[in-house]
Image (tube, helix red, strand yellow):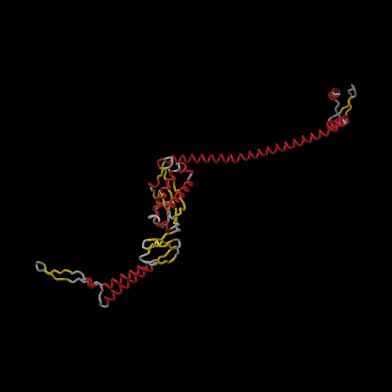
Amino acid sequence: MDSIFSIIILLVVASIASSIFKGVKNSKGNPFSKFMEKDKVQEFDEDGNPVFKSRKPNIKKFPVKTVLLVVVALLIFAAVNGSFYTLDQSEQALVFRFGAHNKTVSTSGLNFKIPFIDRVEFVNTEEVKRIEYGFRSEFSGNSAPAEFSNQYYSDVMSEKVMLTSDENLVEVEVIVQYKVIDPEAYLLNVNDPRETLELAAYSRIRRVVANHNLDNILTLNKAVMQQEMMEDIQEIANKYGLGVLIVTVQLQDVDPPEAVAAAFTDVASAREDKEKYINEANQYFNKVIPEARAQKEMLLNEAEAYKTVRINEASGDVARFVQILEKYQEATSITRTRMYLEAMQEILPGMDIYIVDGENITMLPVKGATITNSEAVAGATANQ
């Protein structure tokens, strides 16, 4: 749109220059030449020598019409140029009429405003902006302005050094990313919304750091601190009515002061070794304890099975003994004889049997016995 209006103004200037050139060519002269003519007046000095002085331009010959024509053309151009503005899809426009907020436009494309009366402020509601604390990103010669590189930055020590809860110093670098969600609140509630957000966020970052001790800041609570910072900054932004949404808070670098950095490095290494040994012990624990528990369960199951078998066997023996006792009480003699015979039936098949007649040492083997020595005979005789 601006290029079109630039072409229009060039055409107006070209037409004026063309009219001047044509006037000179047609012997009518340049309209400014008569005004710029300076008649010379002859005078004489004290010695009688002629002196020529230039007279001032003749105001009556000034080309008022030509100048008015140019001024009117420029005013028309400015009015036309100031009547339209282009709104991008990611933007919203706040229209101020005589300095007061009149309306907010979110329709993208070409929009109209009253020239010389309305003023338009554009707010990008999709762009994620960032604020840096403790350092500033710098641009290389070949990079675009919107591109940041970790290779090019400079420290800001006045922002970087902070105090912890245990009264130690720590160097902290933080990036806060936000975007505008309420353009009216962003532009109307405070005079300088970005600077206000920068100061408010910086105070909350220092407060969060001051609530943690140095060990936690350097090792354990980075994610917790980032969440606390984001919640606190969003809270104070809402309190001031800035109309922004805090997208994320990133702790870039958290380092001890350079004078004690080596000692803290040793402490961090020792803490890492501690964590490593704890993890190894937990691994061993997780391996051995389940095996011991499995072995315990197996032994308990075997004991329960043995217990059940022994109880069942004992119950069966008791039941059988009760049955025998009942039979024994009914027929004592017969039962005793039967029990004796059953016992012998179990014992005798595995023994060598010899029959000895009185004091005669002659031995009669039963079932093919072949022992004939005197020790066997004597033993049989002694046990008779």
Q: Which picture quadrant has residue 354?
A: top right
Q: Is residue 338 rendered to the left or right of residue 92?
A: right
Of residues 159 and 60, the one nearer the viewer is 60
Q: Return the x and y of residue 163 as percentages of the image width and height.
A: 41, 43
Tell me, yes or no, if residue 300 can be seen here.
yes
Q: Is residue 148 visible?
A: no
Which of 58/357 is in front? Answer: 58
Q: Is residue 48 above or below residue 128?
A: below
> Which quadrant is home to the C terminus?
top right
Residue 143 coordinates in the image, percent (x, y): 41, 57
User: Is 45 drawn above or below residue 135 in the view shown?
Assistant: below
| Rendered location of residue 46, percent (x, y) | 9, 66
Q: Left or right? Give the position of 317 relative to 83.
A: right
On screen, residue 362 above or below 165: above
**Residue at (32% x, 70% y) in the render:** 72
Q: Classify residue 31 as left or right of residue 220.
A: left
Residue that lies at the very extreme toward the left in this rendered image: 47
**Outermost residue toward the bottom in this view:** 26
Residue 153: x %, y % from top left: 40, 51
Q: How many marks?
A: 0
Residue 137 sits above or below residue 375 on the image: below
